[in-house]
Amino acid sequence: MEHYLRAELSRRAVTQNLRVIRSRLPAGCRLCAVVKADAYGHGLSALLATIAAGADALAVATVPEALAIRQAGYEGPILATMAYGVSTGGEALDIAAEAMRCRIDITLAAAADVMPLAKLAGRLKARPDVHVKVDTGMGRSGVAPADAPELVAAVRSAAPLHLAGIYTHFAASDEFDKSHANQQFARFQRVLRKVQPLTGVLRHAANSAAVADMPHTALDMVRPGISIYGYPPSWELASPLPVRPILRLVAPIVQIKSLAAGSTCGYGSLSRITRDSRVGIVPGGYGDGISRQLAGRYAVGVNGKMAPVLGRISMDQIIVDLTDVAGAHVGQTAELISPDPAAPNSVANLARILGTIPYEVTCRLGRRVTYKVVSDFDLPAPPPANTTGSFASDTQRQTPTVNATEVPSPADAVHHEVVKA
Ligand SMILES: Cc1ncc(COP(=O)(O)O)c(C=O)c1O
């Protein structure tokens, strides 16, 4: 049975976004679509066929994620980017065994892991594809550039292992200032020169931001994620990809009622309405990924109008002010997330309001959401090629433009007031 909250996913938007990405790649460069965390919260099982049709390979973080994709019938290459320390044995070895049985490409980041992995492959009579991950400045997983040649040599001399790739990951390719990303790429190139020849070995580095702004980093394969789903990795790109959001989150209004002026709404009686009002109840709350931090700063689309959400966001439902929405009725669809990048309830604008990034907004979408692929959305106007706006990032950035649509703050709201902090 379907929960009332439904994520509509535009097949055409996914296909177009993949084409846009591919149009920025040199001839012969492979496109490895990053589909970890359930396609960044968009529901991978619904999207798998469409993404697979436009990509040459898929990447996820963990081996269990990769196994699920294999079990769903995908036959192409799948890279698990998490480097498990198989030298520790135990569960890490079990995971590696599963990866070999299902032909998942394994990431290695330490020379100590080579022999245990090779012995396991020998026992299983497997010849796993291995990618060496080099930490050129992300400071996360990966082998240090100075130790990379030793790791590559160890993989090459461990007969059952097949060196299929060597890669790195950028920490700041989405920033206006590309000096750190350039430095990382220079370090990676130095490693590549030291481990020649690399015939038949895939060299890869670029994420969405690098595909957009650093085309020289495309090498043999790129690994875009967020741009497939239609969101910019940041607002600081010089040549943003003209992609568009693939997601529309909707739910029906399940009840409409009248509340007298002076009534309060929701937990903590946070919001008091200042006029006689019609309110609608819409299923969808923080249990589904609609952040509680949006209280007083969130509106949903009903009948072509933005209807403010009143009071706190509950785990399962929101209270929507329908007083100014003519013709609103029970069963009517409320749009909780709009695929229009200029809408106040677009993923990018919600991210900006929450002080986070689009990645987190969509990854939060909960398990009660039903995912459904539709051919496309009926948008009021074509989305702008270069959407303006801003959202906060993990670091303090020099953000040039702040232009996203504001949802009225509680202080601006005319028809309800915040009675408690
Ligand atoms: C190793 C790796 N490659 C590629 C990506 C894709 O990055 P983006 O979604 O910014 O394109 C990620 C995402 O975090 C990643 O961890």
Image (tube, rainbow, N blue to C red):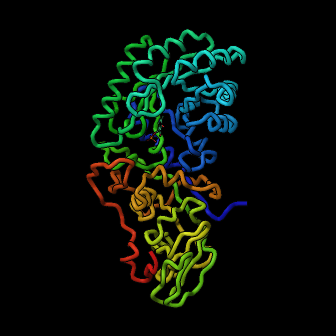
Relative to 327, is 172 on the left or the right? left
* Residue that appears at 36% across and 29% down: 217
Asked whether residue 169 is in view, the answer is yes
Q: Position of residue 119 (x, y in %)?
A: 66, 15
Q: Position of residue 166 (x, y in %)?
A: 47, 22
Task: Name the quadrant of the C terminus.
Answer: bottom left
In front: 301, or 205?
A: 205
For residue 204, what is the image quadrant?
top left
Asked whether residue 328 is in view, the answer is no
In front: 384, or 168?
A: 168
For residue 346, what is the image quadrant?
bottom left
In front: 49, or 254?
A: 254
Task: Name the quadrant of the N terminus.
Answer: bottom right
Q: Position of residue 212 (x, y in %)?
A: 36, 39
* Residue that appears at 55% across and 9% down: 157
Q: Position of residue 146 (x, y in %)?
A: 40, 18
Tally the marks.
0
Q: Is residue 361 above or below residue 94?
A: below
* Residue that appears at 49% across and 55% down: 361
